[in-house]
Image: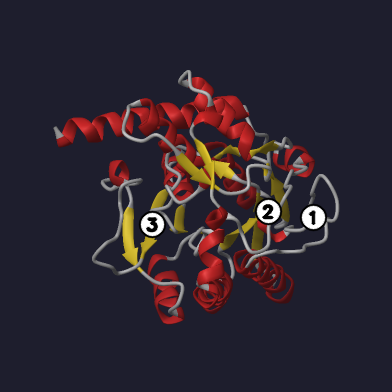
Amino acid sequence: MTKRALITGITGQDGSYLAELLLAKGYHVVGMVRRSSTVNFERIGHLQDDIELVPGDLLDEVSMIQIMRSQRPDEVYNLAAQSFVQTSFGQPVLTGETTALGVTRVLDAIRLSDHEVRFYQASSSEMFGKVVEVPQSESTPFYPRSPYGVAKLYGHWITINYRESYGMHASSGILFNHESPRRGLEFVTRKIANGVARIKLGLDTEIRLGNLDAQRDWGFAGDYVDAMWRMLQCDEPSDYVVSTDETHSVREFCEVAFGHVGLEWSDHVVIDERFFRPAEVELLVGDASRAREILGWQATTPFVDLVTMMVEADLDNVARQQRNLA
C-alpha cells in the first residue's frame, strides 16, 4: 500500500525538499498549513497538483488530533517552527509556543490517535550554543544561547520523553545549518547570496552584516532531508547529528559568494551592530559519524558548490524580477 506522510512546515525550505523526496519514493504527501490569507506557496507551487494540503496549527492541539485521525499518516515529519534565531529574541513567548510546545501537541495527537505512526522531530545545532566540545556529537552536552535554541531543546527532550514513556517510534535529527536557494531572505546565507546578486546587477552597493567571525557547519538542505527519511526507516528510533563535519565563517561565505561574480567582498560588506545577537554562538561543527554508520547517510554537496548554487539562483531571480518590472 502507498505510504502516507504528513509534513508540518511543508511551505518552508526543508518541507519543499522533503515533499519532493517522498513523492519520488511513491508516498502520498499531506502538508499541514495554517489558515491564513497570506500563505506563501512559492516553494511548493510546482508540487501543488501532487500533494494534499490540510489546515492545522501547532498552537491548536484539537486541529492536530483531527488531522491524525482523518489522514492516518504512516510517518509525521515535524518541520514547522518559528525558525529564525534573531526573531526569537524579540518574540520569545511565540517561539516557545510554536517551536517547543508545538512539538508536544503533535506528539500527544499521535499518542491519542495511533501509536504506530513514526515521528521525526527537527532538532537543531543551536541547542549546542556555547559549545563545550568540538566537534559536537549526539553525546555533547547542550548549552543553548537563544530562545530559539532553548525551545528546540525542549522539543528535542519531549520527543525523547514520549519515545521512552509511550514506546513511540520518535526520532530527532540534530541538523546543523543547511541552506539552499529556497532559504528565506532573513537568513544570513541567503541575505548574502541575494545581496551579491543585487550588487552585481547594479541595484545595490552594500550588504550590512553582523558577526563575520561566527563559524557554522553549512550543508545543502536537499541532502539533509534524505537523512530525515532514513531515520524513520530504521527499526529502532534514535537521535542523529546531521552535518558536513566542516566549519566555515560568515567571512568565508562572503569571500566565496562575491568572488564567484568577480567582486571583492570587503568593498561591499558593512558591519552593523544591529545584526549582532545578544548572546552569540561562535562555533558550530558537527560529527555525523553515527549517521554515516547507521543510516548510511553523508553530505554530498561541498561548501563552495552550495554558495555558488545560491548566488547563481539569486542572479536568475533578481534578473527575472527586473525584467518583470520593465
* Crowd band around label 1 with a 10 angstrom C-alpha radius: few (<14), some (14–19), many (20+): many
Please identify the quarter of the rendering in which residue 33 is found.
bottom left
> For the point 40% across and 52% down, which residue is it?
29
Q: Give how far across and how far down residue 126 sits, in percent.
A: 67, 57
Q: Is residue 2 left or right of residue 216?
A: left
Q: Quadrant of residue 52?
A: bottom left
Percent of width and height locating residue 17 = 46, 43
Res 30 label: 3
Does 268 sit above or below residue 295?
above
Upstream in sequence: badge 2 or badge 3: 3
Indicate the amino acid at tag 3: Val
User: Which amino acid is tagged 1?
Assistant: Val
Is residue 138 or residue 97 the one in the foreground? 97
Circle 1 residue:
131
3D distance between C-alphas at marks 1 and 3: 37 Å
**Residue at coordinates 57% horizontally, 26% vertically from top-left?**
256
Q: CA distance from mark 2 to mark 1?
A: 10 Å
Q: Nearer the viewer, mark 2 or mark 1?
A: 1
Residue on which disc 2 sits = 125
Distance Cα–Cα, label 2 vs label 3: 27 Å
Q: Residue 226 versus residue 325: which sits nearer the camera?
A: 325
Residue 253: x and y, percent? Answer: 59, 33
Q: From where the camera sits, is residue 250 visible?
A: yes
Residue drawn where x is 80% and y is 49% of the image: 137
The relative height of residue 19 versus residue 93 in the rendered view (above or below) is above
Q: Residue furthest left?
A: 326
In the image, which is nearer the foreground, mark 1 or mark 3?
Answer: 1
Compared to 252, does 230 lie above or below?
below
Crowd tier of the residue under label 3, counting other residues whose Cα lies within 10 Å: few below 14, some 14–19, many 20 or above: many
24, above or below 240, in the image:
above
Residue at 45% across / 47% down in the picture? 13
Q: Amino acid at mark 2?
A: Ser
